[in-house]
């Protein structure tokens, strides 16, 4: 029997045949080649199956009825035989050094649960910067290590830039299948609280912005973000102690405020009032939230 690959690359996809080929090609052209490539088709109705057939034995293809990205990723990991898992989105691109960089780090550090790095923007700079994590912050994280507050204050983990121990992934229960947008943040929180996590100051993937990005659903993104934060502090008292009540309340309140603004913009009066009331309750001394709560009580 041949030796199992060191890494299992898992790609979950849904109706992205036009983008997926380029993603697959970027994975197949890695400098590091000790991996298997698993593609889980989450019920696509486009040409995904036919397009992937052209790759032959270079990929392991699995089809399931549509259950969402978290369920598709979990299915891929169940089929994986590698000790390490690389989870890739079906629209982004891996840099040639992707697996070489990450696996090179964990080779002598098998006790780590996850190592992750930085990414760039396909097509040039975005948000007035070249990389997803700003340069100065990237260097600081690599030099001084990742703290829970780093993950909490800004969602810096992109699983497209991560390598996860399969044992650690399974120990925390994998992806939360109720989540469709904030599953990366939720998984990163649970991995951080249960195992060692490291960061490398390297750009190893490129993020593609397009109309189909799930993160563009602002209402769902904010409600799931709130859910993930509440889940973190309720299920893990240590996390709440590390972050402090004020930090947690401030972030939740701001998310509720953003939720209220979005709902008000779309004419959802009751929902807007409910969200701004939650923000005000979390930060009762905030004049801004109190003012908006008063103003929106009558619109």
Image (cartoon, rainbow, N blue to C red):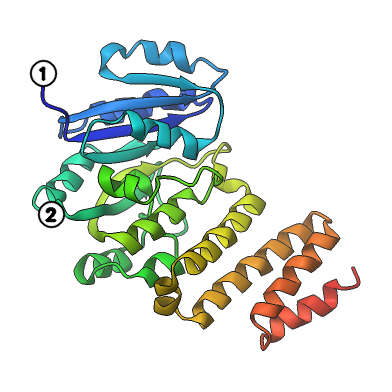
**Outermost residue toward the right?**
298
To which residue does mark 1 refer? Answer: 1
Q: Nearer the viewer, residue 50 or 234?
A: 234
In the image, 32 versus 10, the foreground residue is 10
Q: Tell me the tag on residue 109.
A: 2
User: Callout 2 environment at 10 Å: few (<14), some (14 to 19), or many (20+)?
Assistant: few
Residue 176 image position (x, y, % from top left): 49, 47
Front disc: 2 or 1:
1
Where 147 falls versus 125 (above or below)?
below
**Residue at coordinates 45% horizontally, 10% vertically from top-left?**
50
Please give left or right for residue 268 compared with residue 158 in the image.
Answer: right
Q: Is residue 79 visible?
A: yes
Q: How many marks?
A: 2
Which of the 4 image quarters holds residue 98? top left
Left or right: 96, with 68 as reference point: left
Residue nearest the viewer, comparing 219 with 171:
171
Q: In percent of the image, x 54 and y 21: which residue is there?
A: 44
Residue 90 shows in the view? no
Structural distance between the alpha carbons of marks 2 and 1: 27 Å
Q: Earlier in the sequence, mark 2 or mark 1?
A: 1
Image: 111 above or below 87: below
Classify mark 1: residues with Cα within 10 Å, few (<14), some (14-19) or many (20+). few
> Residue at the location (79% across, 60% down)?
271
Q: Residue furthest bottom?
A: 285
Q: Position of residue 280 (x, y in %)?
A: 71, 78
Quadrant of image for the C terminus: bottom right
The quadrant in which residue 94 appears is: top left
The answer to which image quadrant residue 281 occupies is bottom right
């Amino acid at each position: 029997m041949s030796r199992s690959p060191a890494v299992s690359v898992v790609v979950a996809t849904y109706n992205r045949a036009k983008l997926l080929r380029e993603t697959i090609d970027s994975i197949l052209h890695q400098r590091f080649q000790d991996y298997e490539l698993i593609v889980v088709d989450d019920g696509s109705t486009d040409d995904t199956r036919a397009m992937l057939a052209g790759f032959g034995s270079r990929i392991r293809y699995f089809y399931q009825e549509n259950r969402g990205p978290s369920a598709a990723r979990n299915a891929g990991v169940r089929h994986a035989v590698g000790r390490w898992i690389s989870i890739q989105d079906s629209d982004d691109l891996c840099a040639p050094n992707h697996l070489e960089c990450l696996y090179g780090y964990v080779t002598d550090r098998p006790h780590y649960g996850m190592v992750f790095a930085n990414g760039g923007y396909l097509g040039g700079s975005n948000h007035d910067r070249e990389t997803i994590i700003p340069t100065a912050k990237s260097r600081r994280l690599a030099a001084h290590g990742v703290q829970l507050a780093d993950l909490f204050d800004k969602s810096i983990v992109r699983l497209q830039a991560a390598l996860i121990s399969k044992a650690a992934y399974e120990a925390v229960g994998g992806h939360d299948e109720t989540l469709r947008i904030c599953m990366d943040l939720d998984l990163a929180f649970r991995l951080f609280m249960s195992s060692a996590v490291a960061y490398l100051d390297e750009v190893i993937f490129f993020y593609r912005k397009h109309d189909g990005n799930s993160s563009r659903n602002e209402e769902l993104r904010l409600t799931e973000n709130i859910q993930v934060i509440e889940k973190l502090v309720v299920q893990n008292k240590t996390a709440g102690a590390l972050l402090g009540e004020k930090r947690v309340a401030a972030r939740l309140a701001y998310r509720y405020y953003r939720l209220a603004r979005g709902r008000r913009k779309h004419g959802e009066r009751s929902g807007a009032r409910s969200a701004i009331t939650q923000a005000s309750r979390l930060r009762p001394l905030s004049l801004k939230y109190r003012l908006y709560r008063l103003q929106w009580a009558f619109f």
